[in-house]
C-alpha cells in the first residue's frame, strides 16, 4: 500500500512539473500582450489561479473539518491543517500579485475595493485560526477547535467570489452568461495556469499531510512513553 501511494505521489509530482512548464511557456512565450495593459497583464495568469487554489484549499479544509467532527479520524485533522496552511499561502500570493498588478494599472498598491477587502478579511481569519490552534493544549481539542474554525471561516469564501457581483467593484467579471470574456489564447493560458497551480497544491498537500500524520504518530508515542513506569521504579529500561 505504501509503495502504491509513493507511486501515485511521484506521478502527481510529474504531472505537476509538466503542467507548470507548459503554463510558464504559455504565459511568457505564447499568449500575446493585452492591448491596453501590455506585458504587466501577464500577472493575471498567476493572480487568478492563486485565488482559485486558495478557495479550493479552504473548501478542502472545511470539508475535512466537518468529516473529522463526524469520524474523529486524526488523519483528517492533518488534511484540514495542511489545506488551511496552503490556503493562506495561495491567498497571500493572490494578494501580493494583485498589488503588483494594481500599481501600474490603478496607480495604487491597494484600494478598499469589495473584492480586495473581503479577500483580506479571509486571509486574516485563516492566519488567526492557525495561530489560535497553537494555544489549545491537547491534540484532540486542537483538532476539534480547528475543525469548527475552518467550517465557520469558509462562509466568507463564497462572499469573496461573489463580491464583484454583489457590489460595485473595479474588478472585471470574467465569466458572464455568454461565456468567458477572454480571447481564446488567454483562456487557454489561464486554464493551464489553473491546472498547474491546482496540481501543485495537490502535491504539496499530499506531502504535508504525510508530515502531519508522522508528527501526530510521534506525538502519540511520546505521550504513551511518558506514561510508562520509569526504570528506577521497576519498569521497562
Image (cartoon, rainbow, N blue to C red):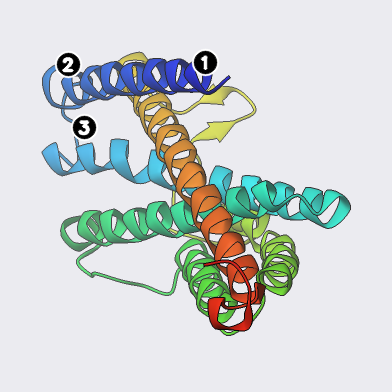
Report the residue marked by disc 3. 34
Residue 139 horizontal side relative to residue 199, left or right: right
Element marked by disc 1: helix
Which mark is nearer the camera, 1 or 3? 1
Q: Is residue 28 above or below residue 171?
A: above
What number is the disc on residue 30?
2
Q: CA distance from mark 3 to mark 2?
A: 12 Å
**Closer to the camera in the image, 47 or 82:** 82
Which mark is nearer the camera, 1 or 2? 1
- Can the viewer see residue 74 in this picture? yes
Q: Is residue 195 above or below residue 225?
A: above
Residue 13 in picture, x, y percent from top left = 35, 23
Mark 3 neighbour density, 10 Å: few (under 14) some (14–19) many (20 or more): few
Element marked by disc 3: loop
The residue positioned 59% from the left and 32% from the top of the image is 176
Between disc 1 and disc 3, whose residue precedes?
1
Between disc 1 and disc 2, whose residue precedes?
1
Report the residue marked by disc 1. 4
Quarter holding the N terminus is top right
Residue 109 horizontal side relative to residue 7, left or right: left
Are the residues tagged 1 and 3 within 8 Å (C-beta)?
no
Residue 128 in picture, x, y percent from top left = 53, 78
Amino acid at each position: 500500500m505504501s509503495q502504491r501511494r509513493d507511486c501515485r505521489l511521484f506521478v502527481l509530482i510529474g504531472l505537476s512539473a509538466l503542467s507548470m512548464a507548459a503554463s510558464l511557456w504559455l504565459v511568457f512565450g505564447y499568449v500575446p500582450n493585452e492591448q491596453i495593459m501590455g506585458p504587466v497583464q501577464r500577472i493575471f495568469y498567476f493572480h487568478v489561479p492563486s485565488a482559485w487554489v486558495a478557495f479550493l484549499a479552504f473548501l478542502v479544509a472545511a470539508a475535512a473539518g466537518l468529516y473529522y467532527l463526524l469520524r474523529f479520524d486524526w488523519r483528517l485533522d492533518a488534511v484540514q491543517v495542511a489545506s488551511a496552511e496552503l490556503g493562506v499561502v495561495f491567498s497571500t500570493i493572490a494578494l501580493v500579485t494583485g498589488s503588483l498588478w494594481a500599481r501600474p494599472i490603478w496607480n495604487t498598491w491597494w484600494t478598499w475595493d469589495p473584492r480586495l477587502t473581503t479577500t483580506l478579511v479571509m486571509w486574516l481569519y485563516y492566519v488567526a485560526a492557525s495561530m489560535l490552534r497553537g494555544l489549545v493544549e491537547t491534540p484532540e481539542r486542537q483538532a476539534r477547535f480547528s475543525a469548527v474554525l475552518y467550517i465557520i471561516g469558509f462562509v466568507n469564501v463564497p462572499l469573496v467570489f461573489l463580491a464583484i457581483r454583489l457590489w460595485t467593484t473595479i474588478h472585471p467579471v470574467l465569466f458572464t452568461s455568454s461565456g468567458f470574456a477572454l480571447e481564446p489564447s488567454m483562456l487557454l493560458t489561464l486554464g493551464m495556469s489553473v491546472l498547474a497551480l491546482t496540481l501543485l497544491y495537490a502535491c504539496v498537500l499530499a506531502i504535508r499531510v504525510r508530515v502531519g500524520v508522522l508528527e501526530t504518530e510521534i506525538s502519540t508515542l511520546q505521550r504513551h512513553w511518558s506514561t510508562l513506569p520509569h526504570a528506577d521504579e521497576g519498569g521497562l529500561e
